[in-house]
Amino acid sequence: MAAPEGTPAAAAEMEEANDASRPVVLISSDRVRSVREAVAALQQRTDVFQRGGILVHATRDAATAKWLVTPRGAPRIAQIPTSVLLLKIADSATCKSYKRTEDGVKLLRCHPPHWLGKTIADLGEWSAFPYLQAVTETPLLKPDGTILSNPGYDADTGILFVPPCTYPRVPDRPTLEDVERARRLLEAPFADFPFAGNSHLGCAIAGILTIMARFAFRGPTPLFLVDASTAGSGKGLLVFVVCMIATGREPGVAVASDGEELRKTITAHAIAGSRTILLDNIIGEIGGSALCAALTTTTWTDRVLGANVNYSGPLLPVWFTTGNNVTLGPDMHRRVCHVRLEPSSERPEERTGFAVPDLRRWVEQHHAQLLTAALTILRGYCAVGRPDMGLTPWGSYEGWSALVRSAVVWAGWSDPGDARDELRAAACTGDLAAKRLAYGWYLLGESTAADAVETLYPRAPGGCPAVQRPLRDAIDELTRGKEVTAARLGKLLSKHRGRNLGGLKLDFVTVRGIGVWSSTGTPDGTFSEGGGA
C-alpha cells in the first residue's frame, strides 16, 4: 500500500523508485571503480565534452531583462568547475557508500565526494566524452563541402549547432543564377562604404566567408584589417556587418595590448571557442610576438588562468582589427587581409543620403537571408569541384586561400590578394626600416657591431657622418629609441640576417675570432644613394 502523498514515507518511496532507474556509483576505497562508474554515468549526458585537455560544456550568459540594448549572450565554451561536475554526477547517478548504523552496515545514499570530481577533471584524457571543437548558432560549411544544418552535436566536425531560428535551405547544387542572386544580395550592405578599390570589397566579402568556412579548411586565417584614411569612415560598422551576417552576433572585443596581457586574452578566447575577435581602434603600429603567433597557428598551449591545468587545444577565431592609417610591424603584411576605406568628405561621420539609412537594423533583420547567400557562394564553389583560380600563393594561409579566397574570385569579386600588395608598400614601416638598415650597412661596408656603434653614435664632437645618418635613423626606428649597444645592434642584425631586403642580404662571418657583419648583393633601386625612399 502506497504511503500518503506529501509524507516522509512517500518521499522515501519516490527516492527509492528514482534510485532503481538510475546507475549507482559506489563510493568506497576502490577509487578506480568509483571513477569508472561516475564517468559511465556522465557519458549518458549530452552536456559534457572535452577540449584541449579539460572538461567543458556549452553555456551562455543569462539575460532576464525585458528591454535589452545589447543582444542576449552568445553560446560559448567554458571549463566545467569541479563543483558543477559533482552536480552533474549527482544528477546522473545515485552515489552510495557503506555506513555503519544501529542495524549494522548498510549501503546508503551519499553526496559525491570532492575527490571524485577532481580526479575525473584531472585525468586530462577521456574516451567517454565527445570532443567539442566549436559552438555555433548559424549553419556552417563542413570540410566535405556540405552544409552543417542539423541542430545538435555533429560528430564528424565536433561542432555543436544550436540555432535560434530556422534558416532558409541552401541549394545542394546552386545554379549560376543562384550564385548571381547571392552575390548581389551580399553586396547590398556594402553599397555606401567608400572602398579604396574593388579588391578591398573582395576582402570584406572574404571576411564573411572565412567565418562561415572556418572549420572547412586546415591552417590559420589572416587578420582582417579594416583601415581608413580618417576617423568616422565606418570601420566599426563594417566589422559589425561582416560578423552579424556570418554569426548573427557582434564580434567579441579584445584589448589591443601586447605581451603577457594579450597572451592571456588569447588563451581565454581559445578556451571559449570564440569565433570572431575584434582588436578595436589600433593606434600606431600593429604586431607583436603574441599576435603574430596567434595568426599563424591553429593550436594554443597555455596555463588556464586561476587553475593549475594547461589548455592545449584549438585556436580558431577569425581576427579583425580597425584603425586609421595603421602601420604594420615586421613581417605583418603577409598576415593581413586589408580592407581600406577612403571617404572623399572631410567629416565622413556627417554624411547623409545612404542607400540603407539604418544599416545595423537592416542587417539584423535580413541576417538569415544574407547568411544563406554567403553559404550559397561557398556551396556553389564546392559543388563545381573547387576549381583552381590561378591565384598568387599566399604563404602560411594556403588552406584559406584555396577555399575562401578562391571562392571570392570564382563568384566574380576582385582578388583579396591585390590589396595585400598595396598594403605592403604603404603600411609596412618595419620592413621599410629593415631595407634602409640593409642599404645603410651596404654603404657602411664590412664592420663589427661594436665599430658600427662607435661610428654611428660617437661620443667625440662632430657627430655621425652625414652619409651614415639614414642607417642610424633606421636602427633607431627598429630599436624604438632604446639605447643602441653593440649587443643590441647584433641582435637586431641577427633578426634580419639572410632576408632579401631590397636586393641585399645581411651576412655574418667570423674573421680571426671577430664577428663581422656585411650587406651583400645588388640594391634593387628601392632607396636612393642618400638612403631615402
Image (spheres, grey):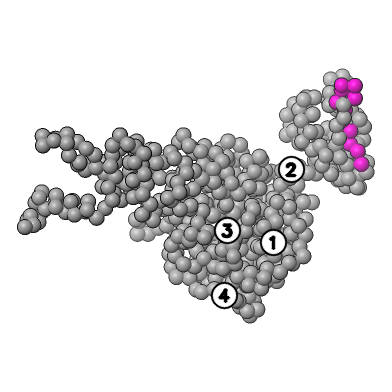
Counting residues from the start of the chain, the first of labels 4 and 3 encountered is 4
413, 232: nearer the viewer = 413
- The reply to whether dot 4 and dot 1 touch (C-beta < 8 Å) is no
The answer for how far apart the CA atoms under marks 4 and 3 are is 19 Å
The answer for how far apart the CA atoms under marks 2 and 4 are is 44 Å
**Number of numbered discs visible in the structure rendering:** 4
The answer for how far apart the CA atoms under marks 4 and 1 are is 21 Å
The answer for how far apart the CA atoms under marks 3 and 2 are is 29 Å
Q: Crowding near pointer 2: few (<14 within 10 Å), some, many (20+)? A: many
Q: Which residues are magenta?
A: 511-521
Which residue carries the number 4 mark? 172
Which residue carries the number 3 mark? 215
Image x and y of residue 429, in percent: 76, 44
Answer with the quarter of the image where residue 286 lies: top right
Chief secondary structure of the magenta portion: strand
Q: Amino acid at mark 1?
A: Ala
Which residue carries the number 1 mark? 402
Counting residues from the start of the chain, the first of labels 2 and 1 encountered is 2
Relative to 504, does residue 397 appear above or below in the rendering? below
Tell me the quadrant of the picture where the C terminus can be found.
top right
Answer with the quarter of the image where residue 218 lies: bottom right
Answer with the quarter of the image where residue 301 lies: top right
